[in-house]
Image (cartoon, rainbow, N blue to C red):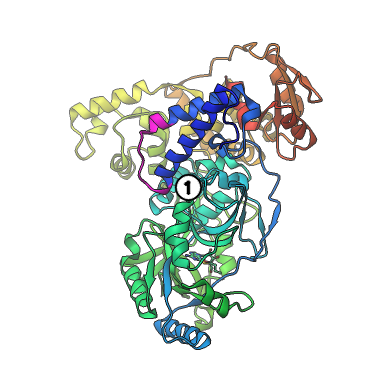
Amino acid sequence: MSQLGGQSPAADEITRLRELIDYHNYRYYVLDDPEISDAEFDQKMRRLQALEQQQPHLVTPGSPTQRVGGAVAEGFASVEHSPPMLSLQAVYGESEVRRFDERCRSILGASQVEYTAEPKYDGLAVALIYDDRVLVRAATRGDGYVGEDVTSNVRTIRSVPLKLPEGAPDRLVVRGEVYMLREDFRRLNEMRQNREEPPFANPRNAAAGSLRQLEPRVTAERPLRVVIYQVAEASGVSIESQWQVLSDLLPAWQMRSPNEAVRFCSSVEEALDYHREWLDGREESPYEIDGVVIKVNSMEQQRQLGFRTRDPRWAVAFKFPARGAITRIQDIMVQVGRTGKLTPVAILEPVQIGGATVRRASLHNQSEIDRKDIRVGDKVLVERAGDVIPYVARSLSDERTGEERIFRIPDACPVCESPVVRSDDEKSVLCVNLSCEAQLRERIKHFVSRRGMDIEGVGERTAAQLVDLGLVEDLADLYALDESDWVRLDKIAEKSAQNLVSAIQSSKVAPLSRFLFALGIPLVGEHLAELVSRHFPSVQQLVEADEEDLLAVDGVGPEGARSVVTFFRDDNNRRVVRELLEAGICLQSPEPQEKARDFEGLNFVMTGTLTRWTRNEARQLVEDRGGRVTSSVSRNTDYVVAGPGAGSKLARAEELDVAVLDEDAFAEMLRG
Ligand code: IVH
């Protein structure tokens, strides 16, 4: 019988909803076979949330509403693994696998041994611990003995059951892999690139980076999945074989096992077939695997075989050869991107990797080149992971002839020759000249883009031609183009020319924030542009601002401030901005927001380190809206705003059931 059954109608409904939601979650995330629509699901979830809000004392950690923890972890606590999470012996050839089989047979005194063959998921190992069928802890592998407590993050992964079905063991410890589908990874990177955040190198890094986030809210937005492949402890269950684990037990406990992808093998030869099949089909798989794991099927035999120091004698990881190739760096070129970033690119002797001819590979930045000691003329290992741009993994320095040349990104932009700005760590080298020709096409594209000045009809080719024909040398020149200029471009007839001229004219009235974004100042995305524009009523004031003035804007950090100041200190950039304004661009400052007194009667307590506001600023924000800030948490407190490092006040708030907001939630509330 359920814990809450028969207590009150609301409690009964809560129990029923939780069971339903858990069930539909399982259908959707574990079986990939939903029975109801997303909308129906959301409706049930909202109903449960509403009921729990009315009856906060009924909220339990196993409730499906508890997936997204709001609180921020203060770094990760350690979790000890018992038994330790061992690694696997890696083997690379069929003969090594056959030797493994011979060793097993000889120790066991058997003529044939049965195995399971499973994908070796290329993700991050995790342990999940259930007590009384509720997920109580999740940890990374760490060094195998001690890992990091990532419970709040793992809770956000939908294929991880928060509560196990009836019949599952009271205590259960399982292990598996957190990973990301290629398609999800591609989309995540696309989104990151749109936001000018650095892309992840491969799905594995993306999964690891997402799981080790200090803010569970961020993890919750990442498309992580889990697959379970091992049971480390299960009270009251006697386990006969790995096959039973994969095909019976895990599915019965509603855990996502690799069951469709695994194979029972009555001999090692079948396991080798399995590996060959995977090797052929590898590129088509929706997720990345870096080999197959071959495990002795019988648990009794596993016990007899036992362990070496770091890995079991009853399993091997039969790895795939790396998708890389050796070639030579003919030259290193420097590319200049839209925001002026100089990126070193290796020009390679063409080489085949995983079915594609690779001619260039990114070297990322100067600091990477130095760290890996990569020189022009070096023989190098080039790798390609998934859809990612190939990169130079390392140089074969033993094979140097003495002809190789050390490379350094030049001090002048390779295109416009203006001096570059290097960051202290040599990770970023920037050309900030608005009129730099290499950036000009890209700057035009960005300037006219929907999120910029929103000028329709100017695409990649058009921008390129405007530059190539010498019609545009500066962004300001765009506003001087007339129909006779436009018709000089390929495929632009009179009608389109008229449209373009009028599109440009009507773009002249624009919010200041869009103009700032359109300029393509390094680090100034839409959000920062918005914040800055609220603070500086005119461009002129911003052009004259120093770093201190910018730092006074909420949400602007030292790097952003430095970037804006460096940008406007450049004489050429000041000229271009002046010319744009002279061309008739008319910028609207945002309306000063009328301050609502919507916090009237509400009591707030601030705790932990707030990163966006000082305590005083936060207090001011609350008081401006009619709220009060007090120093200790009591029953009268309505909200506790907790930053990282929050301690006893946060605990007290939880004790008294006071709503806790993290900075994001508080910011959201301020926005109304
Ligand atoms: S079994 C004692 N099965 O590979 C054996 N591991 O090199 C424990 N991995 O840390 C691991 N897929 O992260 C096992 N089907 C699979 C796996 C798998 C991926 C990872 C896991 C482990 C590493 C060992």
The residue most toward the right is: 631
- Is residue 451 left or right of 374 when viewed as pictured? left
On the image, which quarter does residue 111 sit in? bottom left
Q: Residue at x 54, y 72 (%)?
A: 88
Which image quadrant: the C terminus? top right
Image coords of residue 526 (percent x, y): 50, 32
Image coords of residue 220 (percent x, y): 53, 41
- Is residue 313 left or right of 292 when viewed as pictured? right
Image coords of residue 473 (percent x, y): 39, 39
Q: Classify mark 1: helix, strand or loop.
A: loop
Image coords of residue 419 (percent x, y): 55, 50
Q: Residue at x 56, y 36 (%)?
A: 2
Is 242 rendered above or below residue 56?
below
Residue closer to the observer: 125 or 415: 125
Q: Is mark 1 within 8 Å of ligand 1?
A: no
Is 553 one of the magenta-colored residues? no
Q: Residue at x 37, y 43 (%)?
A: 441
Q: In the rendered image, is residue 536 in sight?
A: no
Residue closer to the observer: 111 or 615: 111
Which image quadrant: the N terminus? top right
Is 589 rendered above or below residue 156?
above
- Is residue 430 left or right of 483 when viewed as pictured? right
Residue closer to the observer: 660 or 523: 660
Is 531 rendered above or below residue 253?
above
Q: In the rendered image, is residue 254 in sight?
A: yes
Magenta residues, start to end:
30-41
On the image, which quarter does residue 357 sit in? bottom left
Label 1: how many Cα within 10 Å (few below 14, some 14–19, many 20+): many
**Residue type pointed to by label 1:** Ser
- Is residue 29 left or right of 134 when viewed as pictured? left
Is 37 one of the magenta-colored residues? yes
Disc 1 target residue: 159
